[in-house]
Amino acid sequence: MRTDARFSLFPTPFRSILLFFVWLLLNNSYSLGHIVLGAFLATLIPLATLRFREPQPLIMRKWLAFKHFFLVLYDIVTANVQVAFLISGPIKKLRPAFVKVPLDLTHEMPITLLASTVSLTPGTVSAEVYPFPESLAKDEKVSQRYLLIHVLDLKDEAELIATIKRRYEAPLKEIFQC
């Protein structure tokens, strides 16, 4: 939980803004009563739910996050074209496989973003992150986590792992500085 005084009333300012505008849009009214009630709820709900959230690393390098977003967008478009060519050819030539990618990331938010990035890129899908933190004892440390992914057409496992680590995981480590 953040202890910075500027975040005491609005611990998650973007979530509060989003809640405020969603409230107004759902009610389809911009009357003073809805504005006041929306502002009240946008302040109260994040404060009431803050204790249920686990602390996550902050985005430390916003410009790199913006750049990473466009890199992932580019990869999604190019992977769509590649998958279209793959599935339009003979299916017998496809080499589907599961690949276990060792993770250097330790926090749940960057791991979730990595898994989402892999799943958003056509031809690959995240299947599991293991070991699950919930399956471990509270005093037990996780020595190594893995991201299990399914690949539509695997040519070289080591190359795929290196590409995922270099292209997606390394920038996330820099963005969150973890």
Image (cartoon, grey):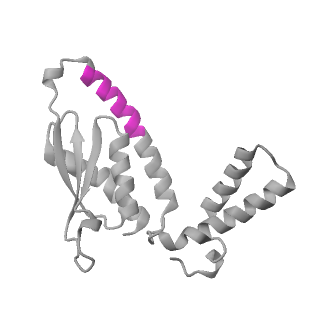
Left or right of residue 21, residue 170 in this image = left
Q: Decide whether residue 84 is among the magenta residues.
A: yes
Pick the residue in front: 80 or 9: 9
The extreme right residue here reads: 32
Please indicate whether residue 56 sits to the left or right of residue 31 in the image: left
Name which residue lies at 36% across and 30% down.
80
Quadrant the C terminus occupies = bottom left
Q: How many marks?
A: 0
Q: Residue at x 35, y 39 (%)?
A: 121
Q: Which residues are magenta?
A: 74-87
| Vertical side of 59 occupied by 141: above or below | below
Q: Position of residue 145 (x, y in %)?
A: 22, 63
Residue 43 in percent (x, y) is at: 68, 67
Q: In the visual, does 165 lie left or right of 155? A: right
Q: Position of residue 6 (x, y in %)?
A: 65, 77
At 84% from the left and 57% from the top, the residue drawn is 33
